[in-house]
Amino acid sequence: MVIESNKQIFTSGERLKFVRSLLRISRSYLQEKYGLPEATLKSWENGTTKITLAGATRCVEVYRKEGLIINEDWIIEGIGLDPKKIAVVSNYFSFPSKQMFAEEDDDEISMIKDANAFKQNHSNAVVMIVSNEDMRPFYWPGSYVGGRLYSGIDIVKGLNKDCIIYLKNGERFFRRLIRNKISKYNLTCLNPNENSPEPVLYNVEIESVAPVIWHRWKNSY
């Protein structure tokens, strides 16, 4: 994708036009491929009709399918990172690295380096090595998972997510966190058919949780 130089854009219509200029696509193309009416988009772009939140959400969905990540706030208010910068970042990550490392064939060392980088780049971050098969098929023994710790009232941020979980008794688990009918917390395996003696831990007392936002596994998996 060729990214053309940006100009000051003040209205939602100008921003929508700018997005199409980045992608180099026509209104008729969007109507034919996604069912976004050409006349409606034209009225939004020209300012004849003010775009609604629902309309902005529709545009976000369409343009993301075309490979450009934007959000409703940027379309309506011009708030946040503009598509040009996002496109440049996306383009940067799409190319393989050129660096050569002495340990490039040692995946275990690479995993450790990646885990260390994750901890350095996120506040209050923890990393855990998966030690059993309780969370298969998504997480295999020997893989790494990482997240940011939450405690107190923020524990709810881990609900229905796979989390590194610290209990008040000092134990640590990697399980899915759910809330039961009496508003207590249960920890459940994803793979209860394995040999775990307790596939579900009921009514646990939680100190903190780290919902998984990073997962690294061996190339051999």
Image (spheres, rainbow, N blue to C red):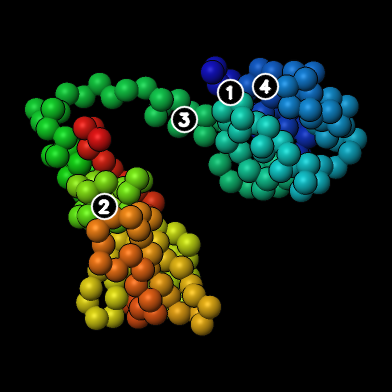
**Sooner in the amino-acid sequence: mark 4 or mark 3:** 4
Quadrant where the N terminus sits is top right
Residue at figure coordinates x 66%, y 37% from the top left: 61
**Sooner in the amino-acid sequence: mark 3 or mark 2:** 3
Which mark, residue 133? Answer: 2
**Sooner in the amino-acid sequence: mark 1 or mark 4:** 1
Q: Amino acid at mark 1?
A: Ser
Cα gap from disc 1 to disc 4, whole angstroms: 11 Å
**Sooner in the amino-acid sequence: mark 1 or mark 3:** 1
Q: Choose between 174 and 200: the one closer to the eye.
A: 200
Cα gap from disc 3 to disc 2, whole angstroms: 34 Å
**Sooner in the amino-acid sequence: mark 1 or mark 2:** 1
The residue where tag 4 is placed is: 21
The residue where tag 3 is placed is: 90
Task: Nearest to the eye among marks 3 and 2: give it.
Answer: 2
Q: Secondary structure at mark 3?
A: helix
Q: Secondary structure at mark 2?
A: loop
Q: Amino acid at mark 3?
A: Ser
Where in the figure is residue 131, as x and y percent of width and height?
20, 55
Q: Choose between 75 and 177: the one closer to the eye.
A: 177
10 Å neighbourhood of mark 1: few (<14), some, or many (≥20)?
few
Relative to 183, is 103 above or below?
Answer: above
The residue where tag 1 is placed is: 5
Can residue 6 be seen by looking at this rendering? Answer: no
